Amino acid sequence: MNYILQYLLLLFLVACAVAVARTRDLLAAVIIFAAYSLIMAVLWQLLAAPDIAITEAALGAGVTTLLLVAAISKTRRQE
């Protein structure tokens, strides 16, 4: 059961990566990137690396998302 969840999360992770690369709206790309980081944090937790999972959740989904949204607010939203 655990392997099925890991494979599904990996599939969703690849889908998020492709969606970030293909989207033209920068704010949508940042939101998808935040989802990517949260999925990575869950995968790290499933792989028994809780310290890396907490770091990924805090920095990847938290701080980086806030910084990117602040940068987008200073510029145009569309690429």
Image: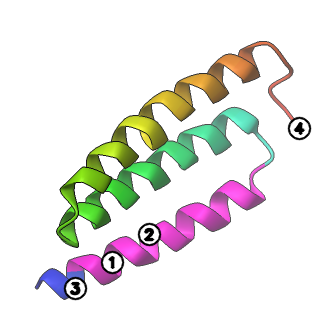
Q: Are marks 2 and 1 in contact (CB under 8 Å)?
A: yes
Q: Amino acid at mark 2?
A: Phe
- Residue 29 drawn at (x, y percent): 66, 44
Q: Are marks 1 and 3 in contact (CB under 8 Å)?
A: yes
For the C terminus, the image quarter is top right
The residue identified by callout 1 is 8
- Horizontal arrangement in the rendering, residue 10 relative to residue 23 (left or right): left
Q: Amino acid at mark 3?
A: Ile
Residue shown at the point (37%, 58%) measured from the top left? 39
Under circle 2, the secondary element is helix
Mark 1 crowdedness (10 Å alpha carbons): few <14, some 14-19, many ≥20: few
- Horizontal arrangement in the rendering, residue 3 relative to residue 1 (left or right): right
Q: Are marks 1 and 4 in contact (CB under 8 Å)?
A: no
- The stretch in magenta equals 5-23
Residue 3, compared with residue 12, is above or below; it is below
Q: Main secondary structure of the magenta part?
A: helix
The residue identified by callout 3 is 4
The residue identified by callout 2 is 12
Mark 3 crowdedness (10 Å alpha carbons): few <14, some 14-19, many ≥20: few
Q: Are marks 3 and 2 in contact (CB under 8 Å)?
A: no
Q: Which coloring applies here?
A: rainbow
* Res. 44 image quadrant: bottom left
Residue 35, compared with residue 10, is above or below; it is above
First along the sequence among labels 1 and 4: 1
Q: Amino acid at mark 1?
A: Leu
Residue shown at the point (49%, 43%) measured from the top left? 34
Residue 70, compared with residue 25, is above or below; it is above
The residue identified by callout 4 is 79
Under circle 1, the secondary element is helix
